[in-house]
Image (spheres, grey):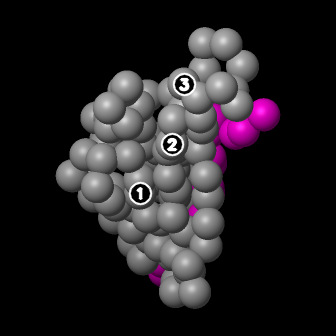
Amino acid sequence: MYPREAHQAKCAGAYKKLFNVSYLAAELTEQNAGFSYLRGTCGDGKPFHGGIAFTRRCEDALVQSRHFSSATVTVRGWTFVLRGNPCGHRCRPGVTHCCHTSPLP
């Protein structure tokens, strides 16, 4: 079984705001694209959501969509790539996409 969600929480910047971001592969379409696969909050708890062409900064943390179904999360020199891919026959019935997370050097 493959994961369908990825969650990351970081304290960012001088004010130590909590930056929480989630990647939801279930929000991707059959064309492997989506408009709301990224969700989260920054400090004040005001929620955000986005997908294609989305960028959100929270002090020194940044989440940014790449292409149609992937995103990068960058905090203090660390970068993680979140990707959604069709999982075909490898997933249980009703599940169409899975999520992969990988750090960048």
* SS for dot 2: strand
Q: Position of residue 93 (x, y in %)?
A: 67, 13
Question: Residue 81 at what x, y percent from top left?
Answer: 51, 64
Residue at 61% of width from left, 58% of height from top? 101
Instruction: Tell me the amino acid under the disc marked 2.
Output: Asn
Q: Residue at the spot x=55%, y=79% of the render? A: 104
Range of the magenta residues?
1-14
Crowding at mark 2 (Cα within 10 Å: few <14, some 14-19, many 20+): some
Which residue does the numbered mark 1 point to in the structure image? 71
Residue found 51% across the figure and 35% down from its top: 86
Q: Is residue 35 left or right of residue 61?
A: left
Q: Amino acid at mark 3?
A: Thr
**Residue most toward the right?**
1
Sequence-earlier tag: 2 or 3:
2
Residue sitting at x 70%, y 31%:
90
Q: Nearer the viewer, mark 1 or mark 2?
A: 2
Q: What residue did someone put label 2 on?
A: 85
| Mark 3 crowdedness (10 Å alpha carbons): few <14, some 14-19, many ≥20 | many
Foreground: disc 3 or disc 1: 3
Instruction: Return the disc, 1 or 2, that comes first in the chain's sequence.
Output: 1
Look at the image and say whether residue 6 sits in the magenta stretch: yes
Q: CA distance from mark 2 to mark 3?
A: 8 Å
- Find residue 96 and name its label: 3
Query: Where's the C terminus, which quadrant?
Result: bottom right
Q: Which mark is residue 9?
A: none
Asked if marks 1 and 2 touch (Cβ < 8 Å), the reply is: no
The kind of residue tagged 1 is Ala
| Sooner in the amino-acid sequence: mark 3 or mark 1 | 1
Tell me, yes or no, if residue 89 can be seen here: yes
